[in-house]
Amino acid sequence: MREIQIVPSVLPADFANLGRDITALHEAGIDRIQWDVMDGQYVPNITVGADVIKACRDYTDVPFEAHMMVYNAERFIDDLADAGCQMVIYHPDTLKHPHRVFQATRDAGMQAAIALSPTTSNDVVDYVGDLIDMVLVMTVNPGFGGQAYLHTMEPKIAQMRARLDRLGLTEMDLEVDGGIGPDTIAGAARAGANVFISGSALWKYPSFAQGVEDLRAKAEAAR
């Protein structure tokens, strides 16, 4: 059975004290950290780039993943590798030539993954399954933290898990991102996800450690 993983998004962090928050997340027992990279064009918001990610690399040895909500994300592959990212997640509709981008990401020593917005078809995985290492099903529309979880995405998660199994990708991680917290993680886990991005909800716990423990327990119990 695929391992349950709890992965914080740093969007709710204190950006004036990112190193402190990254250290605290590390000590809480997280599995990796997600960096939401937004360009103000594909999505309305603007966040961080490779330079900020690189500045935080020394604060933890947990893997970094960059969720690229930008156009022409292939421009940043080398910079993300230099920043210490282990995985880059792309929205296929932002790429002119997805196969080239996924291969270039792997050639740079990183894993490649795809993110599917709520209205993006699951069909895309049929054509890129051999070049990706993970699928992310968005449970909100990309662009902002703190949005409400879309329960209507649970059938899509289940359909993606079945599709991956049918394609022989039974060990591929299935990640969900958006509104994941103590009241929603069980539904996503039952649908077949095993990697859970938590942002705002994790910051509401008395401590990161309590949040990670609670979310992990709820996901494992739901399976």
Image (spheres, helix red, strand yellow):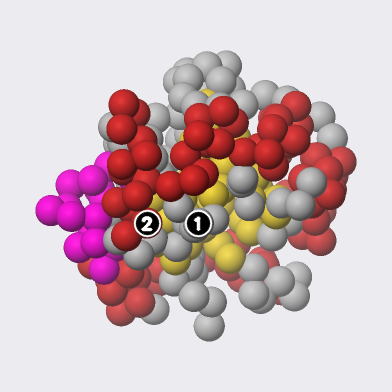
Q: Nearer the viewer, residue 150 or 67?
A: 67
Residue at (53% x, 77% y) in the render:
2
Q: Secondary structure at mark 2?
A: helix
Q: Which residue is mark 1?
A: 61
Magenta portion: prevailing SS class: helix
Quadrant in which the C terminus appears: bottom left
Q: Can see residue 59?
A: yes
Looking at the rendered structure, the kind of residue marked 2 is His
Quarter of image, res 90: top right
Residue at (75% x, 70% y) in the render:
167
Q: Is residue 192 magenta?
A: no
User: Are the residues tagged 1 and 2 within 8 Å (C-beta)?
Assistant: yes
Would you call the spot at circle 2 few (<14 residues within 10 Å), some (14-19), or many (20 or more)? Answer: some
Spot occupied by residue 190 in the image (x, y as percentages of width and height): 40, 71
Spot occupied by residue 130 in the image (x, y as percentages of width and height): 81, 61
In magenta, the rendered stretch is: 199-213
Spot occupied by residue 96 in the image (x, y as percentages of width and height): 81, 29
Q: Is residue 203 magenta?
A: yes
Q: Horizontally, is 170 left or right of 158 in the view?
A: right
Q: Nearer the viewer, residue 131 or 8?
A: 8
Q: Which residue is mark 2?
A: 26
